[in-house]
Amino acid sequence: MKEEIDMSYAAGILDGDGSFSIMKSNGKYYPCIQLSNAYKGMSEWLYNKFGGSLRVKKPQKEHYKPLYVWSIRGIKGCKDAIEKFFPYLVLKKPQAELMKNFSEKRLMEDFQEIDGERFALEMRNLNQDILIRHDTLSKYEQLENDCPTFWSYAAGIMDTEGSFSIKKEKPHSGSVSPRFNPMIQLTMVPSDVLVYFRRHTLLGSFCIPKSPCAQRGYVYKLSICSKKGCIEFLSKIINYLKCKKEQANVLIDFCENFKSVKYCQGKIPDHILAFREEMYQEIKMLNNTPS
């Protein structure tokens, strides 16, 4: 069961920040699986699980973070890795399947480099399709479940594409104190992963906001903003998180010890406000300093 949980987590982070490509070097085509992420521990975990190589990519601009790049190149390494995590992929299963087919074809005696060119073009088209295709969000399909492989996959996606934060807003509606609210978000261009979430959990709300940075102009977003919803979501996923577990723990602490205040003429007591500010600063620092 541990191996299944590990492989579903691997599928989650590869569906998030991973890439599948067929590359050309010295006139020959070869497969490559890669993950580039600011969290060093994530790339190291993949390296320990699947082998391959690790390198650090220096930031291109002063305010950018260094990226930790894990990759596997070559037929055997890619084929062995895909066989392990393939059943748990949601978004990039077509790319993995194409890479499997390419690897099998590459080993045949009648393989020609023109075949490699065809596979490389098809892979590029699949990767491009993720960014430009028109999707829809399906309806909820089933009730809440506690399947470990789902929550492990969800942890992989949240460790890459998700965020755990506390939103601080200016005073309004007669209040003189700032407002603090928990926020769990997952934002992705394709809908596949969010559809998968809707099949396994009723938590959170879904929307399709406009996005100037997306090629098709909009993205899909899952948001959980209620304290009760955040606690329930985090209690299910926290044991599977590897890179953002500290943020999750801070958010649980914040939600469980929030202490709602009523009838205070718009001003929250200083000791309660200090707790909220402390949690806000702590999770903000953790999000700015990936490890």
Image (tube, rainbow, N blue to C red):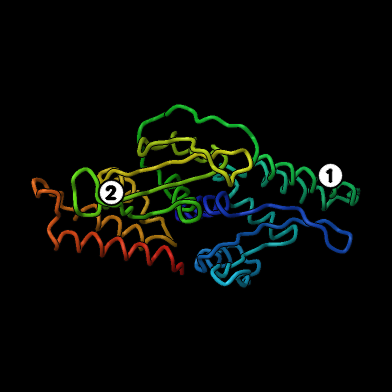
In depth, the one of 261 and 202 nearer the eye is 261
Residue 166 at least partly seen: yes
Q: Is residue 66 left or right of residue 128?
A: left
Q: Position of residue 76 (x, y in %)?
A: 72, 59
Q: Position of residue 165 (x, y in %)?
A: 36, 55
- Mark 1 surroundings: few (<14), some (14-19) or many (≥20) residues within 10 A: few
Q: Is residue 237 left or right of residue 256?
A: right
Q: Position of residue 167 (x, y in %)?
A: 33, 52
Q: Is residue 239 left or right of residue 172?
A: right
Q: Amino acid at mark 1?
A: Arg
Query: Sequence order check: which comes first, mark 2 or mark 1?
Result: 1
- Disc 1 is placed on an element classified as helix
At x 61%, y 32%, the residue is 134
Q: Position of residue 234 (x, y in %)?
A: 33, 50
Q: Is residue 209 left or right of residue 124?
A: left
- Mark 2 surroundings: few (<14), some (14-19) or many (≥20) residues within 10 A: many
> In the current view of this chain or complex, which residue is farthest to the left?
263
- Disc 2 is placed on an element classified as helix
How many angstroms separate mark 2 from mark 1 (CA)?
Answer: 48 Å
In the picture of the structure, the residue carrying the numbered disc 1 is 118
Write down the quadrant of residue 142 in the picture: top left
Q: Amino acid at mark 2?
A: Ile
At x 49%, y 35%, the residue is 208
At x 21%, y 53%, the residue is 256
Q: Are marks 2 and 1 in contact (CB under 8 Å)?
A: no
In depth, the one of 177 and 284 nearer the eye is 177
Q: How many marks?
A: 2
Query: In the drawing, what numbered circle is on residue 231?
Result: 2
Query: In the drawing, what numbered circle is on residue 243?
Result: none
